[in-house]
Image (tube, coloured by chain):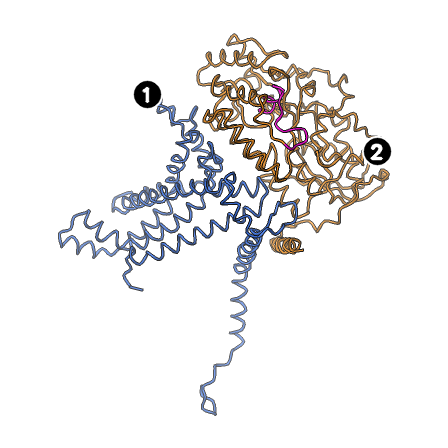
Chain colours: A blue, B orange
Amino acid sequence: MASTTGKISKPARSRSFWRDTRDGYLFIAPVVLGLLIWTTFPMIASLILSFTDYPILKSPKWVGVQNYVDMFSIPTLRVMQSLGVTLTFALTSVPLTLIAALGAALLLNQKLRGMNFFRTTFYLPTIVPALASAFVWGWLLNPQFGLVNSILTKFGLPKGEFFTGTSSALPTLIFLSLWGIGPTMVVFLAGLQSIPESLYEAGKIDGANGAQLFWNITLPQLSPTIFYNLLTGIIGAFQYFLSAFVLTNGGPVFATFFYNLNLYEKAFKWQQMGLASAMAWVMFAIILVLTLILFKFSDALVYYEVKK
Amino acid sequence: MFDRSIKHWVLAGATLALTLSACGAPAAAPAAKSSEAAAAPAAEQTGEITVYSVPGSPQKVLERMQKDFNAKYPKVNVKINVHGSGDFAEAMYAKGAANNLEDIVFNADLFVPPFVDADLLVDMEQLAKADKSFDMGDIYESILGLGKVGTKPGVYMIPSGLDTVQMYYNKSAFEAAGAPLPTADWKWDDLIAACKTLMAKNPDTYCFDYSDWWAYFVPWIEGQGGRVLSEDGKKSLFSSPEARAGLQAYADLWQKHKVTPLPGASVQDCFIAQKCFVFFHIPAFISTFREKIGDKFQWDVEFTPSQPKKHVTGMGTYGFSITKNAKNPQLAWEFLKLLASPATQKALYAERATAPLLKSLANDPDIAKDDGKPPKNMKAFLNGGSIGIFPQTYPVKCGGLYSGQVNSVIKAMLESLMRGTQSVEAATTAADAEIQACLDKN
C-alpha cells in the first residue's frame, strides 16, 4: 500500500497478528521455561559451583580453580583413571556398535517376506528399560550361578568371570552395549532406504558386484548417517553410566570406574559438589572438542549431494 | 560474603524450580530453635509434628508411636512423610541442603556426623536431662554411641534397638552335612571347618556372603587388638601389625578358604535360596526369614564367631533425630522419646524386629518368653551388646566407614585383598597413605 508521501509503509499490525504472536509465545513458553529452569540455570549454577568447595550441607566457599587443579594432580581422585576407562569404552564400543548396527540394518533392508517381524525383533531390546536389561544380564552372566556359565560348563568349556574379573568386566560391558543397537540401526535403515535405487541400477549396468556397490554407492550415500551415528555414539559413550552403576559399580578394582561413576561418587557419596561440578565441565569440554574435531573433518569424510 | 551470595543464587533457583514444578515443597523452615528444654506440653496442646521416614519397619514403629502419642496429645497432628523411590541418603542430603527437613527424621549412624557438623540436629541429651520421665542412662551406652560424634558433645539420634550383627545358620543343612552346630564360644576356625564340610556336601553352594561392610571387616581388626583409627582420630592404623593380621585373616576367607564368593558373584537372598548356609546380620531379617523360609528348613542364630584376641561384632541400627527445623522441639521430643519407651521396645521385640535397647528390660518376662518360632536362640541378639562395637568417626570432609573418601579407599583396599591382587602390606600401606593425607588436611 502506497502512502500519500510516496513511501512504502509497513502494513499495519492487525489485532489477529498480535493475538497470534501472543498465542505463539504462550505455546512455546513451557519449553522455553523448562529449558531455562531445568537446563540453563543448572548449567550456570554448576559452572559457578565448580569454583567452590561445596559439601552440600554447608555454604559453598570460593576456591578458584582449585577443583580443576585437584582433578589432575591428586591421583586418589582417580580422574585420569576413570577418563581412561571411559575413553577405552568409547574407542571400542562406538565402532563396534556402528558396525553391528549397520550390519543389522543391511540385513533388515532386504526385500524378504516377514521382514517387519525381524525389524521388530531387532528393535525390541531397546524398548526394554535399561535398568531391567542390566539386571537380567547380571543374572545371566553371574559367574557362579548364571545361565551362560552353566551352558559353558555343559559343553566342557571353562567358566567366564564376566563382570567379576578385572580384565573381563570392561569387555563384558562393551559387549553388552551392543544390546542397545536398535536406535542406531533404525537410523541406518532409514538412511539405506533413502538411497535412490537408480544408483544401484546404474552400478549394476556398469558391471559392479555387491562389494563394489556397497563400497562405492552405499557407504558414500550413507556417510551423513554414519557421521550422525558416530557423533551421537561418542556423546553417548562419554555419558555411559547406568549399566556400570548397576552391574559393577565401578569394580572390580576400578576396572569399570567410568568417568560419570566417578563424578556421581564425588557428588553424592563424597558430597563434594564443587569438585563434581568441575568434573562435569571438564567432560563437557572434552565432548565439545571431540565434536568440533569431528565436524572439522566431516567435509573430507562425509559425502553431501548438495555441497555446502 | 561471596559464598553466601552463591548459596542464595542456588537456593533462589531451586525454590523457583520447585514452585513452578508444583511439587508442594514445604514452606521455608523457621529459624533454628534452641534445644533448651522446657516443661512438657499440656495435654490440650495443639499443633503438628512432621516426621520423615523410610517405609517398612520404621514406618510401622512410627505409627505405633503415633497412637501412643495421640492418646496423650489428641490435638496434635503427627504427619508421617514416607520416603518414596530413589536413594534415601541423597534425599536426606537434598533436604538438609534445602533446609526443609521435617521436625523428626529417620536417621542412621552414617548421617549423624555430617548432619551434626552442619548444625542441623538438636542435641537430645539436653531435652532428656530436663525430662524427669525419661532415663537416658537406661539405654545401653554402646548403642547410644551411634548417635554421638566425637567433635561435639550430645546425643543426636535415639536408636530404635540394640542391633548387633550375629550369625544366622541353616540348622537343617548343618545337621544333614554332619557339621557340628555353632555354639556361643565358636572361633572362626570352627566355622570355616564347618563351612568346608557343608560345601563338600552341597556342590554349587558357598558358605556365606561377606562384603566390605565395616561391620564385617572391622571386627577382624579389633578382634586382633587393632583399631582402624587412633583414639584421637589423627592417625590411620591399617598398617599396624594388629590390623594387618586381622585383614590377612579376612582376606583368607576368599583366597585361602574360599568360603565366600567374590563381590558380584553372590546370589540374592542366598540364605533363603539355600545357596549359602550362614548369614551375618542384625535381627531385622528375622521376620523376612520367618515369612519366606517357613517350613523349608530349620534355622537359628548364634553369636558371630570369636576372633583370636577379642570377641567383637559390628553394631548398627537406625533411629530418629529431632532437627533444628522443629517448630516445637519439646513437642517433638515428647513424640520421639516414645521410641525408647518400654512399650515400644517390647512391641518391636515381639515382632523380632530388634533386641530391646533398655537395660531395664534385660530380665523382663515378656522378653524372656519364647514365641515358638525361629530363631530359638534369641539370646544371641539379646546379649549381643556385650560384644558389639560401633564405627569410629573421621573428619566429615574425609567421609567415614560408610561413605566418602575413606569408604572409597577402604573398599579399594578390601577388594584387592579379596581378589589377592595385592599383599596385605602393600594394600594397607597405600590405604593409610590416602586416608592420612585427608586426616592431615582436615
Q: Which residue is mark 1?
A: A156
Q: Could you tell me how many numbered marks the image carries?
A: 2
User: Is residue A129 something that shows in the picture?
Assistant: no
Answer above or below: position of A149 versus B36: above
Q: Nearer the viewer, residue A30 or B312?
A: B312
Q: Position of residue B168 (x, y in %)?
A: 59, 18
Q: Residues within 10 Å of mark 2 (few under 14, many from 20)?
A: some
Looking at the rendering, which quadrant does residue A168 occupy? Answer: top left
Q: Which residues are magenta?
A: B216-234
Q: Position of residue A171 (x, y in %)?
A: 38, 35
**Considering the image in quadrants, where does the N terminus of chain A appear?**
bottom left
Q: Which residue is mark 2?
A: B131
SS under mark 2: loop
Magenta-colored stretch includes residue B231: yes
Q: Position of residue B253 (x, y in %)?
A: 51, 19
Residue type, label 2: Asp
* Label 1: chain letter: A
Residue type, label 1: Gly
User: Is residue A90 something that shows in the picture?
Assistant: yes
**In this picture, residue A297 sits left or right of residue A21:** left
Answer above or below: position of B317 versus A17: above
**In this picture, residue A179 sits left or right of residue B195:** left
Q: CA distance from mark 2 to mark 1?
A: 71 Å
Q: Nearer the viewer, residue A14 or A280?
A: A280
